[in-house]
């Protein structure tokens, strides 16, 4: 999920957003480079390979060239690995920031956030169809009638596992390995550079859920896990939160008082608070929180859907920690 209000709210409204953003759950540590499958190779890819998917073994091109993304998440990881999709589902790609908008902004739309249009997908003449959320058998049969279809639910994977897995499926292990190495390098640099600040403060990422409720984002929420990989220590209640999000009424804003630093969703450039977060931060109880009174509230990017989007958040968090150190 990217950080425009259109894409974020549209995908949540479609019912897939919260479940899919569980991608940093118990199946892996996003600080693990997964080195066993990422070694670069100079050998030419085979004409056809067999890969394991949520639907069993599927034969795919040795190195896919024309990938159609049959839901919202896949386009970002495909772009991370150096390939522009021939089709993408959802919307808001043209507002997805300087890293992705040039690559994805003009890609033909082939469906909404969760439900692709098989006819439109067929019109892109793909050599591979990528689906990153659970898929019923009827839709899967339609898609496989067009091109080899890979269903890999991101809900079951960490961001680093997403990169490794899709890199293998697309025949782009070398590209995946380089991206994983960059992520591990950058997060370790943050830990070292800002060790004193990270040791001094605890953090909570909070955002409006509705006009009358807000979420705290636990470690299984993608953005929070990226921050933890950078060395951030979570405050309660996020620290012991087992689900990606937990919803509270605005009357319960006081629970955020245990956090030294509060993070809220930003606009796409990471410099200002996202307007849709106003129900939370304009509330009178919010203004009484210790972190708010101390001026320790910072907007940061939200909706990391791939390792590349996670790296964007790392860059913004580096700036936050620099301000805290000053």
Image (spheres, helix red, strand yellow):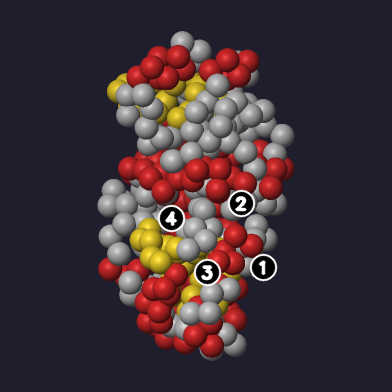
Q: Which residue is mark 3?
A: 280
* Alpha carbon separation for disc pair 2 and 4: 17 Å
Q: Nearer the viewer, mark 2 or mark 3?
A: 3
The answer to whether marks 1 and 2 mark residues whose Cβ atoms lie closer than 8 Å is: no
What x and y, as percent, mark residue 189?
Answer: 49, 69
**Mark 2 or mark 4, earlier in chain:** 2
Q: How many numbered marks does the figure carry?
A: 4
Residue plotted at (51% across, 53% down)? 304
Dot 4 falls on a residue whose secondary structure is helix
What x and y, as percent, mark residue 62?
Answer: 47, 22
Q: Which residue is mark 4?
A: 222
**Mark 2 or mark 3, earlier in chain:** 2
Where is the C terminus found, in terms of image quarters?
bottom right
Q: Which residue is mark 2?
A: 5
* Alpha carbon separation for disc pair 2 and 3: 16 Å
Residue 286 — which label?
A: none
Residue 271 — which label?
A: 1
Q: Nearer the viewer, mark 1 or mark 3?
A: 3
């Amino acid at each position: 999920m990217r950080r425009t209000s259109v894409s974020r709210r549209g995908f949540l409204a479609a019912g897939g957003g919260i479940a899919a953003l569980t991608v940093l759950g118990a199946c892996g540590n996003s600080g693990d480079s997964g080195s066993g499958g990422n070694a670069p190779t100079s050998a030419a890819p085979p004409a056809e390979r067999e890969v394991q998917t949520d639907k069993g073994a599927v034969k795919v091109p040795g190195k896919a060239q024309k990938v159609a993304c049959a839901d919202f998440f896949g386009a970002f990881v495909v772009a991370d690995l150096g390939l522009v999709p021939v089709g993408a589902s959802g919307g808001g790609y043209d507002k997805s920031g300087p890293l992705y908008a040039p690559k994805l902004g003009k890609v033909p739309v082939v469906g909404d956030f969760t439900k692709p249009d098989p006819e439109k997908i067929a019109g892109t003449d793909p050599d591979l169809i990528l689906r990153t959320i659970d898929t019923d058998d009827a839709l899967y049969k339609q898609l496989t009638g067009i091109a080899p279809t890979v269903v890999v639910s991101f809900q079951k994977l960490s961001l680093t596992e997403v990169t490794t897995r899709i890199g293998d499926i697309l025949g782009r292990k070398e590209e995946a390995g380089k991206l994983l190495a960059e992520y591990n390098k950058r997060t370790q640099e943050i830990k070292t550079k800002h060790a004193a600040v990270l040791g001094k403060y605890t953090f909570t990422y909070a955002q409006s859920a509705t006009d009358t409720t807000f979420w705290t984002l636990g470690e299984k929420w993608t953005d929070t896990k990226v921050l933890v990989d950078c060395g951030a220590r979570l405050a309660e209640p996020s620290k012991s939160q087992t689900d990606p999000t937990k919803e509270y009424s605005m009357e319960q804003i006081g629970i955020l008082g245990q956090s030294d630093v509060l993070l809220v969703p930003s606009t796409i450039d990471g410099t200002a608070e996202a307007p849709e977060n106003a129900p939370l931060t304009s509330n009178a109880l919010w203004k009484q929180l210790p972190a708010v009174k101390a001026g320790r509230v910072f907007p940061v990017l939200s909706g990391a859907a791939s390792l590349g989007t996670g790296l964007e958040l790392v860059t913004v968090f580096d700036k936050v920690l620099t301000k805290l150190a000053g």
